[in-house]
Amino acid sequence: MSRDNKVAILSVCLNLVLFSIKYIFALFSGSIALKAESFHSLADVVASSTVFIGLVLSKRRSRSFPYGLFKVENMVSLFVAFAILYAAYEIVIEVLRGGSRVPHHVIPAVASVFFVIIIAYLFSRYEARVGKEMGSPSIKADAEHVRVDVFANLVVLAGLCSAYVGINLDRAAALVVVVFISISGIRILTDGIRVLLDASLDYKTLSAAEKMIASEAQVLEIKDLTGRSSGRYKFIESSIVLKTHDLDKAHFIASRIEENIKEHIKNVDRVLIHYEPTSKEFLVYAAPVEDRDKLDISHHFGEAPYFALAKVHINNKRIIETRVIENPFIKIEESKGILVAEFLVKQSVDVILARENFGRKGPFYVFSSASVEMISTDKDTFMEALRSMGIVHKDS
């Protein structure tokens, strides 16, 4: 049995025990408020039972419900919210009826209520922690309900204590607690309705997903990113533009993004990535060079002081723009080649020209993963290497 199911069953049992304690001492003391609160606990038994049923049903999948019944949890949380609001109504009615009449055998009744408050408070803290860890809306809602029950018992305790000292503060305390109860119920009700209406995921979750997608080297553009909740689970969908025309590689990249999101964002049930290849008009060629003027191609990739880049029109193979950038990792002792390769990928390089044969070294895997073509050349300068490939300057 899963942890959330165990907590739900424990909640049912606890509320049965609390109902028994309250009802027995209500008969013993003659307290109408305590008797009403005992029936409130009986309603809690029904609410907790509903939570357990919702948890069991929410995990079922079928042909008719291929996406699961996760939203049953949110429907359950709505019922719990209505139960909380009804508890507020009960307390108001009790105040209006003047249910704080002086009972007898006050000391045992106070002791029983105090015991109930301690047990309910400790369980609500435990249940809220479990609900937060598991991301379960129904468990969190039930924890809120139990916490509300603590406030309701405080009202009863205040009535009993005030009766004992001859000062009746029951009505004023009850009205204050009603405000807190109503706020809790409305918050749970609002959250449940948002999910049932497929409201967007929170900004924090979507922002985290966006960063993970953008960190993938082959992703050129995030065209769309949406998400929704269903029960405790999250569903994320994104449309991206990839720097590859290879469908197998595109599928591999999308799968890697999906796994990364599921690993780092809690309770993600499904990630759907729509990918499309980039439609390019230009290609960027790059080569390690020794100087800024002659652009002599360096014999060493990672230790080259500069890199020459040329933007080339795909159709007519004319150079549109050239620029030279410094190697920012030239003073780094270790993994220099990999760092440089990752740096060039971020510069949107499509083709790398080099004298050095990368073999199966680090830069090879970086460029392969980013769909960067690697071409060996024996030409002395960057421009000579480009001309040998039929690429000419725009003024030629």
Image: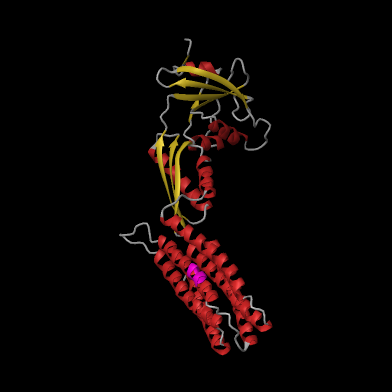
The residue closer to the viewer here, 380 or 72, is 72
The residue closer to the viewer here, 172 or 2, is 172
Left or right: 45 in relation to 100? left
Which stretch appears magenta? 84-89
Q: Is residue 179 above or below residue 350?
A: below
> Number of marks in the image?
0
- In the rendered image, residue 61, in percent from the top left (x then y), is placed at 36, 62
Q: In this view, does 183 lie above or below 34?
A: above
- In the rendered image, residue 348, in percent from the top left (x then y), is placed at 51, 30
- In the rendered image, residue 94, in percent from the top left (x then y), is placed at 53, 76
Q: In this view, does 173 lie above or below 362?
A: below
In which image quadrant can residue 290 be found? top right
Q: Can residue 100 be seen in this view?
A: yes
Residue reaching furthest left? 64
Say how the picture is coloured. secondary structure
User: At x 64% / y 30%, what residue is drawn?
Assistant: 328
The residue closer to the viewer here, 349 or 26, is 26
Residue reaching furthest top? 396
- In the rendered image, residue 245, in percent from the top left (x then y), is placed at 40, 34
Magenta-span inclusion, residue 38: no
Magenta-span inclusion, residue 88: yes
Q: Is the magenta stretch mostly helix, strand or loop?
A: helix
Q: Can residue 4 be seen in this view?
A: no
User: At x 52% / y 16%, what residue is drawn?
Assistant: 384
